[in-house]
Amino acid sequence: MGVLSENIIDVTGMKLHIIPTEKYKTNTIVFKMKAPLDKENVTKRALLPHVLQSNSKKFPTTSLLRSYLDELYGATFNVDLGKKGEYHIISFSIEAANEKFLSDSTPLMEKAFEFLAEVLINPNVDGHSFDQTTVGNEKRSLKQRIQSVYDDKMKYSNFRLIQEMCKEEPYSLHVHGQLEDVDSITAESLYDYYQSALREDELDLYVVGDVTSEEVVKIVNNLFHFSDRTPKNLDEKGPQTKKEAKEIKEAQDVKQGKLNIGYRTNVLYGDEDYYALQVFNGIFGGFSHSKLFINVREKASLAYYVASRLESHKGLMLVMSGIDNKNYEQAVSIIKEQMTAMTAGEFSDEEIDQTKAVIKNQLLETIDNARGMVEILYHNVVSKENISLDHWISAMDQVTKDEIIKIAGKIELDTIYFLTEGAQQ
């Protein structure tokens, strides 16, 4: 099928990934910075991209920076934070029209790269400090982002499940950091952290569009000069010892209970069993035809919503549901029954085929979008694997019923978390 071809080139201090395609009338550039999650730096790291995207030396105010993007035929620029396994990932992405489709011959791709380099390498700095006002504004915004997790009970219950489930593990840290650490960050300490991140993070630069490797390499070598580095990797951990499943109930002023259940899958992205795990999750709770949706929501009318999702780089499967508080025992019992049914092989060939078709469509839909394409390819950086999308789809197509049953036997219940109505504890 050859749906995704990626040319990976080592340039000093980072890897350049070029994905030539005539699919889009825009060129998309995504710069990713990866480092292990750690408590000491997680909040600074959550603040950093927002400070960098606010302004720069050349564009000292946000309005100047944004109006320059408008001059580039309405180029868009975004920052994003993510967790993949126990890594904290910062992404900067810029999408600009491909000048081949314009009557004006402005070299837009080059200008987009120049803009990215300006934001990353030439920040609005005074001596050894970011601009104080910018940092102050962004600290307020970061507090609001962290607070919003506590206000949105669906997000909050998912966060609390992971906190309880992964108590002694870096994965328990929230992607936006910790509220209590925001005030202590100064414009100076953030600038120090910025310098060490650019020196030590694993850096990957993706370019998707109707481009040639030669032109991209030439521009990148001209604009980006990072030092060589050996990126920090996670400490290899031995297998988790099996623990008794935990049950945690928390009372708050909520009208609808949030039942979140965490399982350890004991399978990571790139493992041989990974494709069977994907199909397992699709049949169990991933889609609207899955067992959880049909049995918990449709037949028993117990849940307002119910679904399961995988954290492929951490080996977790998380079930999220919204239920009436009085239905807790029954909902837990029916969810457990669905897991037992999977272990016993109580699912049809039709369910397997339907699930494979939906996963395949999802993957193909994801790569319809340039940034989605980058996210799919970036799994390989995080996992240190080299899995092509063709291989992913064909390996999943070949998954058998026996392999799905075998996977079901590996999955272990870890934590049941219930946010219920009542006075706050």
Image: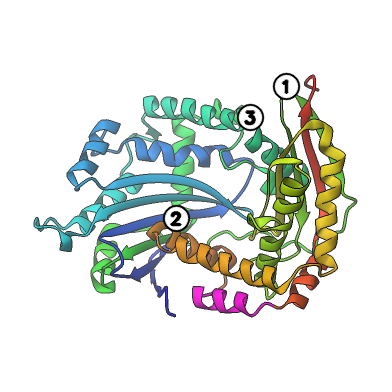
**Which of the two marks, 1 or 3, is nearer to us in this view?**
1
User: Of residues 340 and 266, which is closer to you in this image?
Assistant: 340
Identify the residue at image location x=33%, y=46%.
77
Q: Let me know if residue 307 appears in the view.
A: yes
> What residue would you read off at disc 2?
32
Q: Amino acid at mark 1?
A: Asp
Mark positioned earlier in the residue sequence (3 or 2): 2
- Kindly indicate whether the residue at mark 1 contacts the one at mark 2 (C-beta within 8 angstroms): no
Mark positioned earlier in the residue sequence (1 or 3): 3
> What residue would you read off at disc 1?
253
User: Of residues 387 and 184, which is closer to you in this image?
Assistant: 387
Identify the residue at image location x=16%, y=61%.
101
**Which quarter of the picture shows residue 251?**
top right
**Which of the two marks, 2 or 1, is nearer to us in this view?**
1
User: Of residues 160 and 382, which is closer to you in this image?
Assistant: 160
Q: Amino acid at mark 2?
A: Lys
Q: Residue 170: x, y in percent?
A: 68, 48
**Which quarter of the picture shows residue 263?**
bottom right
Identify the residue at image location x=46%, y=46%.
80
Q: Is residue 395 magenta?
A: yes
The kind of secondary structure element at disc 2 is: strand
In the image, residue 341 above or below residue 63:
below
Q: Quadrant of the C terminus?
A: top right
Callout 3: 10 Å neighbours few (<14), some, many (20+)?
some
Total numbered labels placed on residues in the image: 3
Q: CA distance from mark 1 to mark 3?
A: 12 Å
> What residue would you read off at disc 3?
150
Which residues are drawn in magenta?
387-399
Q: Residue 260: x, y in percent?
A: 74, 43
